[in-house]
Amino acid sequence: MTGGTTGATCRICGGTVQECLDLGRQPVSNAFLEPKDAGRETFYRLTVGFCTSCTMVQQLEEVPRDAMFRTDYPYRSSLSTAMRDHFEGVAQHFLDEVLTGPDPFLVEIGSNDGVMLNTIGRAGVRHLGVDPSRDAAEVARRQGTRVLVDFFEESTARAIRAEDGPADVIYSANCFSHIAYIGSILRGVDVLLAPEGLFVFEDRYLGDIIEQTSFDQIYDEHFYLFAVHSVRAMAERFGFELVDVTRLAVHGGAIRYTVARPGVREPSAAVHAMLADERRRGLAREETFLAFGAGIERIRADLVKLLGELRADGRRVVGYGATSRSATVTGYCGIGPDLVPFICDSTPEKQGRITPGSHIPIRPPEAFRDPYPDYALLFAWNHAEEIMAKERAFREAGGRWVLYVPDVHVR
Ligand code: SAH
Ligand code: TMP
Ligand code: ZN
């Protein structure tokens, strides 16, 4: 086991973190292996707790960042049409509404393959992506996007400020919550952000995760599970103010948070409404997590039962979407190649490899049709609409999708 235990101290406020969920021994989720390396993966204990002072939900054990985000980190944002459209919309919004002053400058933390920045770059606006995953960054660079291959933190922010000056917008999607050392990021934002600048970030929403019992959203990279309460407290602790929140349907439910220096903008009505809603729902209360934990156990029992029955009936089941989330599902439910002989995935970097921990082979989408299985376990349920449309012929041929969010069901 690697990764130092953080104990029960909140990484943001130093308060006490009360453990409330134990998903067991899990591998680094995006470390898809060559078959010959089976057994060489890194494991850690996937446990979640909430801070009794600032309410931030966080993991208790941290995986070293270099074990997750390496040169060959395989995730590519641009592979989903829906996400490409989403980020084009984000870029267009910044271009039309925010980056309107003279010679504006935008920095993105976790720019991956340039899915958002490419639009900013094409518009001729000064920009810089920061991302330690070199192979993904090279994809962005080939399209003319400017990327610094490094981890964003306080020291990186100082170097950028010295070279490029202050940023009007600092943007980050599905990355800020991945960073255990989040204080260094926020001090970096303080160094780099222009006085009237905006720090905008999008991350999965704790409220949606609990509501849908989407426990597979919990894996090494999702170190924090943000909610409006906890993000507001975090922003204030580092000298900022949460001024706006927008709910997003992407990735099974997320929120776009807008943070500014105090006094730059009045917090919107949406912030107040979401705070009241979270209070009503008791989002960071122990009982909420006990019920969530019970829901997770129910899903595990139902899914294992269904897959066992299908196997006993001689039905062929394959997986669809070798997501990082599938590591938590297969690991927690004990699903291996005996129940799901392979998973199809469109990512070339994942094909030919096996899933970490559960050792399920990953094949290209063509393997799905050759011939169609009886059932497909949809690990990429957050892309259900796009995938089901693409694979319409599977259902027309009598195939059925198995989903486990918000409960185990066949479609
Ligand atoms: N923003 C994209 C990519 C999300 S994947 C999207 O929403 O689809 C998360 C990305 O964050 C990875 O490419 C990873 O390399 C990067 N990352 C992780 N820690 C980082 C850090 N400290 N600074 C910058 N990028 C980081
Ligand atoms: P994500 O849920 O983390 O975005 O990962 C989705 C995974 O599913 C990723 O590995 C790519 C894969 N995928 C397909 O195989 N086919 C598709 O049509 C889509 C949208 C994703
Ligand atoms: Zn705290």
Image (cartoon, rainbow, N blue to C red):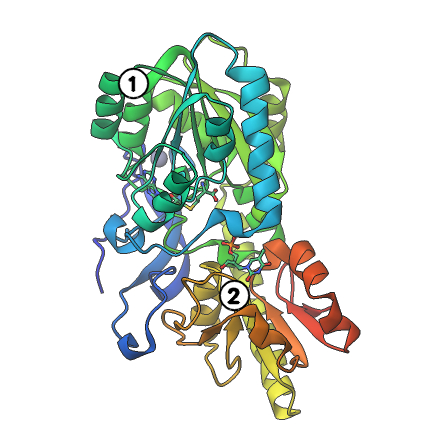
Q: Where is residue 46 in the image (x, y as percent from the top left)?
A: 36, 59
In three-dimensional space, the C-alpha distance between marks 2 and 1, rounded to whole angstroms, equals 39 Å
**Residue picked out by circle 2:** 345
Provide residue 411's location: percent of width, then percent of height: 74, 68
The quadrant in which residue 298 appears is: bottom right
Query: Closer to the camera, 153 or 105?
Result: 105
Between residue 366 and residue 1, name the one nearer to us: 366
Q: Name the residue under label 1.
A: 164
Q: Which residue is drawn at 43% across and 36% down?
A: 55
Q: Is residue 234 left or right of residue 264?
A: left
Q: Residues within 10 Å of mark 1 (few under 14, many from 20)?
A: few
- Do we see residue 279 in this rendering? no
36 is higher (above) or lower (below) than 116? below
| Amino acid type indicated by mark 1 | Asp
Closer to the chain start, of discs 2 and 1, is 1
Left of 163 or right of it: where is 335?
right
Determine whether the residue tagged by mark 1 lies in a helix, strand or loop: helix
Residue 242, horizontal then vertical, whole percent: 48, 21
* One can see residue 120 in this view: yes
Q: Mark 2: few, some, or many residues within 10 Å (few <14, many ≥20)?
A: many
- Looking at the picture, does residue 241 appear above or below residue 41? above
Q: Quick check: 174 left or right of 133?
A: right
Is the C-beta of the residue carrying label 1 under 8 Å from the nearest atom of ligand 1?
Answer: no
Residue visible at 53% across and 67% down in the picture: 297
Give the residue drawn at x 26%, y 23%.
160
Element on which disc 2 rests: loop
Q: Position of residue 388 (x, y in %)?
A: 69, 62
- Which quarter shows the N terminus? bottom left
Check disc 2 and give the amino acid type.
Asp
Mark 2 C-beta closer than 8 Å to ligand 2: yes
Determine the residue positioned at 47% across, 8% down: 264
